[in-house]
Image (spheres, helix red, strand yellow):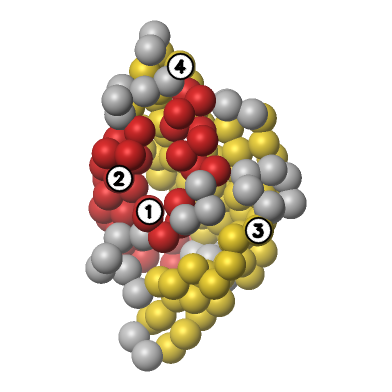
Amino acid sequence: MMNFSRSCLIQAPVTTVWEFHERPDVLNLLTPPWQAVSVVRREGGLGVGAESEFQLFFGPIPLRWLARHTACDLYEEFIDEQVTGPFAYWQHRHQFKAEGDHTRLTDAIAFSLPGGWLSDLMGGWLVQAQLDRLFAYRHQVTQRYCEL
């Protein structure tokens, strides 16, 4: 099992940052232009049972990724887990913490690659680097939309 975490401070209250994540178009906004990903559907907002489905491309090969929300504590965190997709295991915890008038947004991901510990050892660093670039972009977008 591998772990990744990235956090940023957003100059906006927790309610603003949370409500940004509730936007129907948020996944399109948070998808970097360099990623070969399209949002197929998003249903249920941030609550338990909500689903997001993506079409990923590894070169010319399409792959479906379905994530389902398994926990939601209003204005504190929500968790999504992979139902089907490229990982052997994927859990993404989105955490929102008030720091004065600001919000500490943290994305914490636990994942495992298909093929077990050897795959994690050989390819985990690449996934970590891709996640770091992805969440740097996502946090910049979130700051742009939420900061007053």
Q: Amino acid at mark 1?
A: Leu
Residue 97, above or below 44: above
Instruction: Give x and y (percent) for residue 119.
Output: 44, 67
Q: Secondary structure at mark 3?
A: strand
Q: Earlier in the sequence, mark 2 or mark 1?
A: 1
Give me the C-alpha separation between circle 4 and circle 1: 22 Å
Instruction: Give x and y (percent) for residue 24.
Output: 53, 53
Label 3 sits on residue: 43
Give me the C-alpha separation between circle 2 and circle 3: 22 Å
Residue 98 image label: 4
Q: Residue at 33% across / 47% down in the picture?
A: 138
Q: Amino acid at mark 2?
A: Val
Q: Quadrant of residue 124?
A: bottom left
Q: Is any atom of residue 20 visible in this view?
A: yes
Residue 30 image label: 1
- Give the mark toward the camera: 4 or 2: 2
